[in-house]
Amino acid sequence: MNAKAIDQQTLLQNETDPLTHTPVHLLSLDGVGKHYGNIVALSDVTMAVDNGRVTCVLGDNGAGKSTLIKIIAGLHQHDDGVLNIMGEERKFSSPRDALDAGIATVYQDLAVVPLMPIWRNFFLGSELTSGWGPFKSMDVQQMKDITKKELAEMGIDLRDVEQPIGQLSGGERQCVAIARAVYFGAKVLILDEPTAALGVKQSGVVLRYILQARDRGLGVIFITHNPHHAFPVGDRFLLLKRGKSIGYYDKKDITLDELTAQMAGGAELAELAHELEQLGGHSSVVEEVSAEVAGVAQMGATTTAPTDDGGARHV
Ligand SMILES: Nc1ncnc2c1ncn2[C@@H]1O[C@H](COP(=O)(O)OP(=O)(O)O)[C@@H](O)[C@H]1O
Ligand SMILES: [Mg+2]
């Protein structure tokens, strides 16, 4: 994974199983589960990631999103189910293992060195050198040039790659991390809540680079709790709640309103309205929650989930 070795054509097409001639997913989870002692953090989760597609994982705090990506990124191992990378069953023993399989993860608290220049952070841990033995030295100019060029190719226009990365906004830092993963040949890009701490405009910038990474042929896993961020960029949506999958949809089978309603949870809103009433809550608040409940009930009438072949199945 050193050189820039992404063959766009092969990346944009999924491999085909030579025996069955069915497309093989870049990455897939089948009935994956994980527990910490007797806490079940994840159970029976199934999803797929393909080249040039964005799979969104949505869920509130404690839903199991981080556990899911830790399994894919090689930080934790699953206890149940199967993790397949290009049709081959894998269980990663370390983050290095996952990285070698082409899986790059951009964590929310980016592992950057704020005082170091942008180009140093871009090449951190993979510095280019020239010469050998005692004459080996960092090839500074080349690293600066590549950083500038790669960022420009992703449409990121930074004035000066010599600038300490700590001076960039949160959104810009996320974008540098995405460009870095693309450059170092990632096939799967995992983004853990990249927009959670950002304002509307900055979030928009990050969402645009998610699409850039997709268009470069990567399979993107976008973790978020915001359906308004997920819906415009996602091709598939996995909804998690308390470690369980409560829905898995193809874009064509769900609307933004339905996705939002599923996230909000109709039953829980109803319970909340009832509780507020019992507590003598302000009538307008109770009414508002009740109206929301009615809306959710209406929208939750039919739900569909994608099947393996991409078709829809009613659940
Ligand atoms: N290392 C751990 N040890 C024990 N329990 C954990 C650990 N990591 C996560 N959990 C539990 O697993 C559940 C899912 O957590 P997590 O994957 O972090 O959810 P999310 O990222 O969606 O907020 C939570 O109940 C959490 O408390
Ligand atoms: Mg988390």
Image (cartoon, rainbow, N blue to C red):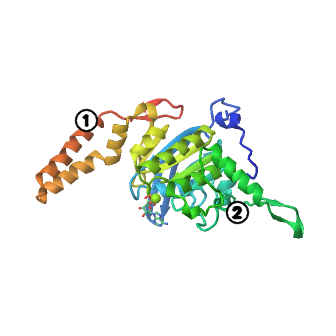
Q: Position of residue 137 (x, y in %)?
A: 82, 65
Q: Earlier in the sequence, mark 1 or mark 2?
A: 2
Identify residue type, mark 2: Gly
Is residue 79 something that shows in the picture? no
Query: Residue at label 2?
Result: 125
* Among the 4 quarters of the image, the one containing residue 187: top right
Q: Is residue 285 left or right of residue 48?
A: left
On screen, residue 11 above or below 21: below
The disc labelled 1 sits on which kind of residue? Answer: Gln
Q: What mark, if any, has residue 79 been given in the picture? A: none
Dot 1: element: helix
- At x 54%, y 31%, the residue is 309
Instruction: Left or right? Give the position of 254 relative to 128.
Output: left
Can I make out residue 71 in this image?
Answer: yes
Q: Which mark is residue 298?
A: 1
Question: Residue at the spot x=52%, y=50% of the render?
Answer: 32
22 horizontally vs 168: left or right: right
- Residue found at x 44% / y 65%: 38
Point out residue 243 in the picture as x, y percentages from the top left corner. 43, 54
**Residue mark closest to the camera, 1 vs 2:** 2
x%, y% of residue 169? 51, 58
Q: Position of residue 181 (x, y in %)?
A: 64, 51
